[in-house]
Image (cartoon, rainbow, N blue to C red):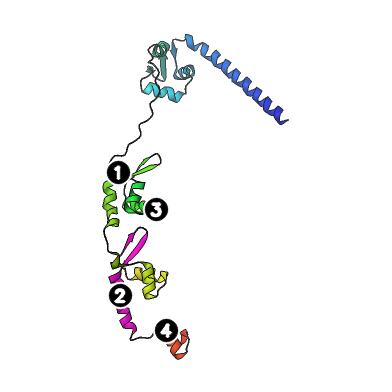
Amino acid sequence: MAWKARTRKKEINQKLELRQEVDYHNATADLKSAEFLTPTETARLLRISRSTLYRYLSSEEIKCRQFKGKTLIRRKDIDKLFDEAFEYKHNKAKKRWQPVSEYYTMGEIVEKYKISRKTVWRRCDRFNIPKIYEGRNTFFPRTDIEKHFDELIEEFDPEEYYTPDQVIAKYHMTHAAVLVFARRHKVPRINRQRTVYYSKEYIDSIKSKVQSIDSLYYTSREIMEKYGITKTQVK
């Protein structure tokens, strides 16, 4: 039953296409002998849409005469287009935009500054660096990139900085405590290849002050352990 339905539908479509073809030839038979045509008749004769025809009229590829409320096209002007037609040429492929030396690709930025693609996008958005898209490739102005990215490759002495793990090991802090401490005291930091480095001198100076104060004070835990009381009682 399904096969019969598909076959029947196919036959109906074929008959409909044949009828449309016959109707088209009947409708255009008189147009071929007409001296003047309307835009609708011209579009039907050329088998193009009205919008396409009006585009040809606007670009003066097809001549016409506009009257008040009426536009007419001479049939012989249409025939003349084909009598004087040029030899057909294939459309040349569009020339792809070639990046010049004034631009970096994403890969070049990642390789030069040893950072992730995510960091590149985030930094470009932060400094409003313009981008040029060509297919799947993205290009960035070299001057803007170097202006805002060169600081990432400035020489620095690792001995003058702590990594988070070094701070944790030296001062017996958790990773979360290190982040809070750095943010609270606005510790100078730099990023190198996805690693954060904190100023050693800055952290040591703050910690030394805290330690000098600690020697004169008890912590809540020390009081609890020494006197055997609860945290609520300490407060």
The C terminus lies in quadrant: bottom left
Q: Residue at x 30, y 43 (%)?
A: 103
Q: Quadrant of residue 225?
A: bottom left
**Residue 187 spot, x, y in % from top left:** 31, 68
Q: What is the CA distance from the residue labelled 3 to the residue labelled 4?
A: 43 Å
Q: Are marks 4 and 2 in contact (CB under 8 Å)?
A: no
- Is 124 located above or below residue 82 in the figure? below
Residue at the disc numbered 3? 118
Which disc, if any, is residue 220? 4
Q: Is residue 6 left or right of residue 41?
A: right
Q: Is residue 87 left or right of residue 5?
A: left
- Is 206 located above or below residue 69 in the figure? below
Indicate the amino acid at tag 2: Ile
Foreground residue among 64 and 161: 161
SS for callout 2: helix
The N terminus lies in quadrant: top right
Q: Mark 2 or 3 closer to N-term?
A: 3
Q: Nearer the viewer, mark 3 or mark 4?
A: 3
Foreground residue among 230 and 11: 230
**Residue 73 spot, x, y in % from top left:** 41, 15
State the residue lying farthest toward the bottom: 227
Residue at the disc numbered 1? 103
Q: What is the CA distance from the residue labelled 4 to the residue labelled 2?
A: 21 Å
**Residue 166 spot, x, y in % from top left:** 36, 70
Which residues, given as a range, are shown in magenta? 188-214
Indicate the amino acid at tag 3: Lys
